[in-house]
Image: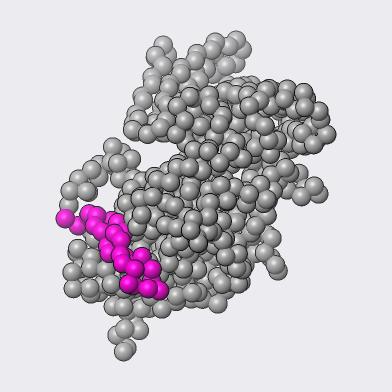
Amino acid sequence: CTFTVKFILQSPTRHREGPTAVPSSDFKYEIWKPPKNQNLLFEIGYFPTVKNYSLSLRLEMKIFTGSLALAVYLQFCCAIEFRRLGQLIPPKLSIEELSPHVGISALTKTSKVGTAVFSQWLDHNDPGKGMFDMQYWWNAESWAGPGSPVVLFTPGETAATAYTGFLTNHTITGRLAQEIAGAVVIVEHRYWGNSSPYEDLTTKNLQYLTLNQSIMDFIHFAKTVQLPFDTDGSSNADKAPWIFSGGSYAGALAAWTSILEPDTFWAYHASSAPVEVIEDYWEYFTPVQQGMQKNCSSDISRVVDYLDDLLVHGNASEKYAIKQKFGMESLQHDDDFMSMLENGPWLWQSNTFTSGYSGFFKFCDAIENVEPGALETPDENGVGLEKALSGYASWSREILIPGYCQNFGYSDPLETACMDSYDPFNLIFTDYTVNNTGGRQWNWMLCNEPLFYWQDGSPKSRPSLVSRLINPQYWERQCSLFFPPEENYSYGSHYDLNQYTKGWDLTNTQRLIWTSGEFDPWKTSGMSSEFRPNGPFPGTKEQPLNVIPGGFHCSDLRGSDAENNEGVQAVVESILAQVKEWVAEYYTRQSLC
């Protein structure tokens, strides 16, 4: 939810820029000194259509004495759609979001841009099981003709309709296509959006959602698709250089493809790629602790330790009272209660270089009992247990709970039934539709491959943002509720996925660019992880590695981040130059054959 606002702060000596100790929130602002007696000017810009969000605008004027003559605070409130588990998807960007800003609404009307379906094998090991339609989108505006390159992008485990902006040069994929005179193609992942072989995602029907089948989808597509702008197949992967670009899980897909099926794509770009599968993934929150304000992290850890101790050693009435304080007295199980509080730290992953005063910073201000625009803020020691506990509870009642269960199909905005992970009739477990909001397909991959990535509390030797009542067993117990046995079908082969994909040892491949953000939670399962044996991978000539200073999740993918941060811009330019060099190398080799 974004808009632009200009506001004036008049002061004889100084002005405060933005709210409490953090950047501007969901708005960009400019400050200037107006002519005498000029009125305050507000220019409210683009309000996109956002599904499942409530929008409100609040203007507050406060008069102060002393050096600050007049201050105007503007807060744009957007109800947060919380999720279970930190997701492995890149930031969304659709053409519809871009068009009011950059005038590209005509882009979808040109014959060089469009969408189509590709007939994909259900089972690449047994073609006799038939095919299903996989949707894809293309932009051939930069394509130089037969034999020209193709940049393939997939958003991974989500419907691709929200990512059509990646066809444009407002993203790294569109920039790559321009740089190498190629086309950009977005391919939807099997079992999501309009690309599912089944409408009813039962345990039996999910058997073909595997890592291997997914990798083979992109291999088969690149080799055999008849692109509408290249009907004779002159730019298929056996005749032209294809670049596989992805972020988050899709970045890992690109990297895993480079080692498991190395003979189709010419080069790879893996942004924020979690290539090492980790079961007890407490390390997810380490970059969050490193990047956030120390006062907030200290107070969250105080609250977590206090609640854990109370829930382990307290009596029934004490437990009920504390759950009631947070608005969750209906939850019978202590781990469910503490799991819900994980939604606060998870908000960090949504930060970008343009998100400003995001949901995460609002969460921290709530814990610290600080209002936007406050003249005084807590030091690194925080406000202490009593105030932080009260602030966390208020945030839970006022921000987290209202509408949370509505995301999963419940009608009452204050319903808490969806928070009960022991209830087999919970709608999160029983919604088998493709467009379910409980993450059914992704949970299948977490349980079945298994990818794990269970985000939980830190060891007792380290401060924790999350309860230590949350452990791998808490999440794994839910697999049987998501996917009850059906006929002879179940989930989980529990083989060593890292042995199959090489995990952190994925160093013996070619033309693969790694990128991560310094404060990306998923960095700790990527090649830049401080927890990797022998330390972070330094990168090589064949595998350049970039860490964006102060960067977040997939910071290099969207142009808006590069426009607002020099570190991102430098990394993006290096990626473009490297891929351009590799593509030139492809054609040089071809000319010598």
Q: Is residue 65 visible?
A: yes
Of 5 and 473, the residue lying toward us: 473
Where's residue 214, x and y in %? 42, 64
Instruction: Give the color scheme: rainbow, by chain, secondary structure or one colour.
Output: one colour
Q: Does the magenta stretch include residue 553?
A: no
Q: Is residue 298 visible?
A: no
Where's residue 535, x and y in %? 69, 65
Where's residue 52, x and y in %? 40, 32
Q: Residue furthest bottom?
A: 593
- Above or below, comparing residue 50 to residue 521 in the picture: above
* Image quarter (top left, top right, bottom left or bottom right) of the N terminus: top left
Q: Give the range drawn in magenta.
A: 111-137
- Above or below, comparing residue 478 to residue 359 in the picture: below
Q: Which residue lies furthest to the front in this view?
A: 487
* Image quarter (top left, top right, bottom left or bottom right) of the C terminus: bottom left
Give left or right: position of 74 versus 66.
left
Residue at (57% x, 16% y) in the render: 68
Q: Does the magenta stretch include residue 120?
A: yes
Q: Quadrant of residue 179?
A: bottom left
Of 349 and 493, the residue lying toward us: 493
Give left or right: position of 323 versus 65.
right
Give left or right: position of 473 versus 126.
right
Residue at (44% x, 34% y) in the render: 409
Q: How many callouts does the rendering have?
A: 0
Residue at (63% x, 49% y) in the render: 477
Where's residue 308, x and y in %? 76, 36
Residue at (66% x, 25% y) in the render: 329
Q: In which quarter of the image is residue 206?
A: bottom left
- Above or below, comparing residue 71 to residue 439 in the picture: above
